[in-house]
Amino acid sequence: MRDYQTSAATHDNEDQTTGCLTPPEASRYLSVSVKELERLRRVGGGPRYAKLGRKLVRYPVAELDAWVSEHVVSNTAEAAAKGVGR
């Protein structure tokens, strides 16, 4: 994950009124592709997001941070047990 500040109000590309990022912004924040975020929305297992319209998706920064925190492991055995990286 890139070295971004954790305060929602300080993200440069963030929607200042909601504390949310667009899918391209979220992909840069997490260092994953937009396609991977799309896949995770379709199959599950990704960060929680807000569906604000038929095609309007936003990722609350707090949810992105929580998703990363849920995937923190100490070793590869722990990662395998959690199913991280599948």
Image (cartoon, helix red, strand yellow):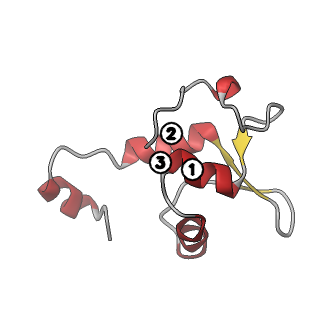
Query: Which of pointers 2 and 1 indicates the residue nearer the eye?
Result: 1
Residue 83 lies in what quarter of the image?
bottom left
Estimate the x, y position of residue 36 in percent, counting from the top left: 52, 68
Report, in whole angstroms, how far the alpha carbon at label 2 lies from the one at label 1: 13 Å
Q: Are marks 2 and 3 in contact (CB under 8 Å)?
A: yes
Estimate the x, y position of residue 80 in percent, counting from the top left: 20, 63
Report, in whole angstroms, how far the alpha carbon at label 2 lies from the one at label 3: 5 Å
**Which of 73 and 28 lies nearest the eye of the viewer?**
28
Tell me if mark 3 has few (under 14), some (14-19) or many (20+) residues whose alpha carbon lies within 10 angstroms of its own: some
Mark carried by residue 67: 3
Residue located beneath label 2 in the image: 65
Q: Secondary structure at mark 2?
A: helix
Q: Secondary structure at mark 3?
A: helix
Mark carried by residue 28: 1
Q: Residue at x 58, y 71 (%)?
A: 35
2 relative position to 58: left or right? left
